[in-house]
Amino acid sequence: MPPLQCDEMKNKRRNYRGIAYMVAAGVLLLAGVADFFQHVSQFRSQAELTFLGRAELLGKFVALHRNQVDAMRNQMVEHYRSPSAENVHPLKAKKTRSPENWELVAASGLLVGSLAGSGQLPLTDQQRREVNAAVSMDSQIGATLAGDADVTSMHYVSATDFIYAAPSSKIDGFRFMKEFYQRPSWTQSLPASNPSRNITMNGPYQGHTGHGPIITIAKPVYDGDRFLGVVALDLNLAMLQRLAGFGESVGETMLVSEDYRVLVRDGAFDPELRMQPPLSPKSAEWLLDKNNDAWLSRPIVKDEFWLVHRVKSGELYWAAARDTVTTWLMILMLFLIAASSLARARLARDLRHSQKVYRLITENIDDVIWLMELPSRHFSYVSPSVRRMFGWRSEQIMDRAMAATLDPDMYEKGHAGLVKYLDRIKAGDLDARHITLELDVRHKDGHTIPIELVATILLNQDGEPCQMLGITRDISERAKVGKLKSEFISTVSHELRTPLTSIRGALGLLAAGAVGEMPVKAKALVEIAHKNSERLIFLVNDILDMEKSEAGEMSFDMRPVDLGLLLPQALESNRAYADQFNVHYELIGAAGGMMLRVDQNRLLQVLANLLSNAVKFSPAGGLVSVVAARRDGQIRVAVRNGGPGIPAEFKGRIFQKFAQADSSDTRGKGGTGLGLAISMQLVEKMGGTIGFESEPDVMTEFFFEFPEWTQPQPQA
């Protein structure tokens, strides 16, 4: 094993150092994460214990005042049923500011209550009993209020438009009598709303005893099945908040009713607020809502009131993270150092590996890999395999122009092809970035090598060609096989043409009745045989044309041709074929004077191929349009038809020999698959270009373009 070089040893030490940093950062990260989650757990546990303590305290508090309301209700019923209940204390009625309300004042000056209506005395029997019961409880209720600072007032609202409240000095003449009958403490205690006669808890709403927002605990009063009214007490909301410890911890605590009204909460007073938190049957169980807020809940009054605590998403973790921020900063710093070192080590390792793989590929592959700079067309890289293929060393070719490394014939052909592709790219055709050419190149010793050149033109940030990356492959063996195949096909085709011609002629005579009338069935068979013999001759002729074109043996009689005369002739020659498919032709834009320099017969052959294809793939009753137009010194002839269009997977090989979209033995369209390949060969050899556009189920268009021919001006 060879000794390590100095640079390699240094890189190895850097790798070890990076690994050590990474391990240290990982240990600190784990410690920081553990510390963070320990704080989260402590905070969560503390929040749970605090919440449970508050819930227990609030439950006792609410139960105490519910018991007070219940006792008040019992006393009211007891005094109401007392034999002396009709012996009303001396009273007088006093008009209030409201024309509908009267005050009932005892002889002692005690404001007994308020009466709605006419205010006339004497009272009804039920009113006398209710007034007497209220007056009898006044001293006891006053003592309760004096001993309980949480209760701001206690009152009795009668179904007979009578209200008693204590302390009376805080009610200010009962000017709010109408509001008492609109409060939920009244409406939710009516028999229709509360058939089970449960205690209700309502609010928050603004009180009228100088204590601000209040919560009301109320219970309906019945004498047997007779509804008398409602007894209730008002609790100071601020005192209730302090007692329950709202606002003292992270998050928000609320008292929520069974219909999701928020009775008590941290923050501003809002009597209309409703909230639907996730309620858990288990104590101190955290639940998440759709916003990922965490909730604790516990019933204060079973199935009626819940104490809930909400910690908004991330709030709990932020509180815990504040205690671990220093550790996190240290972890982050060490992690960045270790990650940077590790990244550099990995980058160096990957770079060495990629260089090794690159050398293995370029030094051992038979194909030549090269990179050419555009537009200078100098080779900036050529793989060493160029010596095996062409006898030149890569150093002899690099930094030299393409013209200096190729023989004139090859350079002319390659240059013309490259210019054509570059022009297409400038015109916006990005598919032209991919080039495939077959050329004959001279070896250093003088013999010719057939090659295949596959290249991609690279674009810069401005979308302009800047480089060309390519692979050159020796296809000598493929050329030999192709030549043998071509010779075999050519030989077979020539041998088939003569007997097929005789067979077609004989069958044509039979079908025409030259030997007399034949039975109907026999005639049908002869016609089928005659058509198939013609198809075979077309196939043989197409194969021979293709072989002549590839061998360079096809002759062209290049003369000026007027499209205004040629296109109608092409349509007329192919009209019978179109009639077989019930397809019609139309000619657009073929005016006289549109001149091309081409071989007229070869161009008619191209048009026949394009027209027959358009007809075959058009629906019955369809229309094939032939459009001629001038564009940038070129004349473009397009053959357009409706139909299924060209499948995307077939577009790349549509001009290849024997290529057909449906190549199965059950395909619905006939043809040899050579027509487009022959058309491409003919158009390009006459100096034109051919292409197509297709939109599935809408339109297909094949077109060719030639430079417009103009009459040379005589020299002066």
Image (spheres, rainbow, N blue to C red):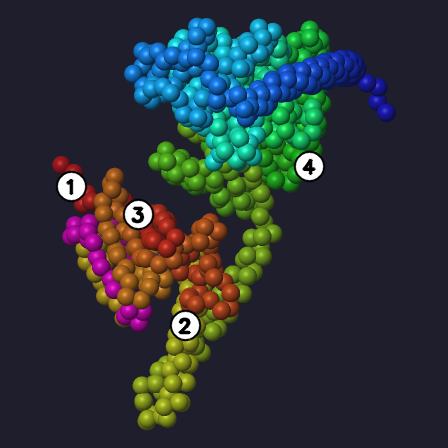
* Element carrying mark 4: helix
Inspect the image, locate mark 1, and give the three-letter code of the amino acid beneath it.
Pro
Measured as percent of width and height from the top left, residue 579 is found at 27, 70
Label 1 CA crowd tier, 10 Å (few <14, some 14–19, many 20+): few
Q: Residue at the spot x=34%, y=85% of the render?
A: 511
Q: Earlier in the sequence, mark 2 or mark 1?
A: 2
Q: CA distance from mark 2 to mark 3?
A: 30 Å
Please tell me whether residue 309 belongs to the stretch shown in magenta: no
In the rendered image, the quadrant that contains the N terminus is top right
Foreground mark, 4 or 1, reads 4
* Element carrying mark 1: loop
Q: Which residue does the numbered mark 2 point to in the structure image?
A: 535
Please state which of residues 241 and 73 is positioned toward the viewer in this rendering. Answer: 73
Q: CA distance from mark 4 to mark 1?
A: 61 Å
Q: Residue at the spot x=63%, y=23% of the render?
A: 300
User: Looking at the picture, does residue 272 appear above or below residue 243?
Assistant: below
Q: Which residue does the numbered mark 3 point to in the structure image?
A: 705
Q: Which residue does the numbered mark 1 point to in the structure image?
A: 714
Measured as percent of width and height from the top left, residue 698 is found at 34, 53
Foreground mark, 4 or 2, reads 2
Chain part drawn in magenta: 578-606
